Image: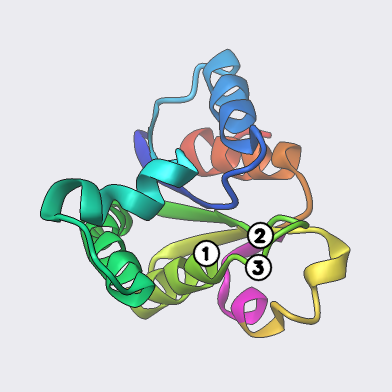
Amino acid sequence: MELTVYLSGEIHTDWRDEIIKKCKNLNLTIDFLSPVTNHELSDDVGVEILGEEVKKFWHDHKSAKINSIRTKNAIERADIIVVRFGEKYKQWNAAFDAGYAIGLSKNLIVLHNDENQHALKEIDASASAVAKNVDEVVKILQYSSTKEI
């Protein structure tokens, strides 16, 4: 079965590349989508395209709205959304993506360590699966697309 999977969340590690590589090694037919993972570009796209802003609020507002075009499109297209919550930063955008996916009744896999369990308990409760590492995510994707693990 062909799947489209959106890889959302933390952008400071190579977890996306790991999942994509492992799925390719298993010959899974998965089309992967992701947000812009260049932090500076994502933060500044609004003013780069639409012009400078004096106030940081409007700078961020422009970028958030432009980024939402890609994000909303990808989540709506995806069969499965994987949201990774990292250890170092508060990923409010990841929480938003998870909530949007839940609101659309999408299949959601949440990926985080045990330290974030309490903070993410409501998101975890609405997810189809909660994984602790990339290998668990890959096995879920393998099972979902081939019925094998």
> Which region is colored magenta?
123-130
Write down the quadrant of residue 90 in the picture: bottom right
Which of 36 and 34 lies nearest the eye of the viewer? Answer: 36
Q: Which mark is residue 94?
A: 1
Mark 1 Cα-neighbour bin, 10 Å: few <14, some 14–19, many ≥20: some
Q: Where's residue 121, x and y in %?
A: 71, 82
Q: Is residue 134 above or below residue 46?
A: above
Marks 2 and 1 sit apart, C-alpha to C-alpha, by 7 Å
Q: Quadrant of the N terminus?
A: top left
Mark 3 touches mark 1? (CB < 8 Å) = no
Q: Is residue 87 above or below residue 121?
A: above
Looking at the figure, which quarter contains the C terminus?
top right
Q: Residue 85 — which label?
A: 2
> What residue sits right under mark 3 in the picture?
90
Q: Is residue 40 magenta?
A: no
Q: Give the side of residue 22 with respect to residue 102, left or right.
A: right
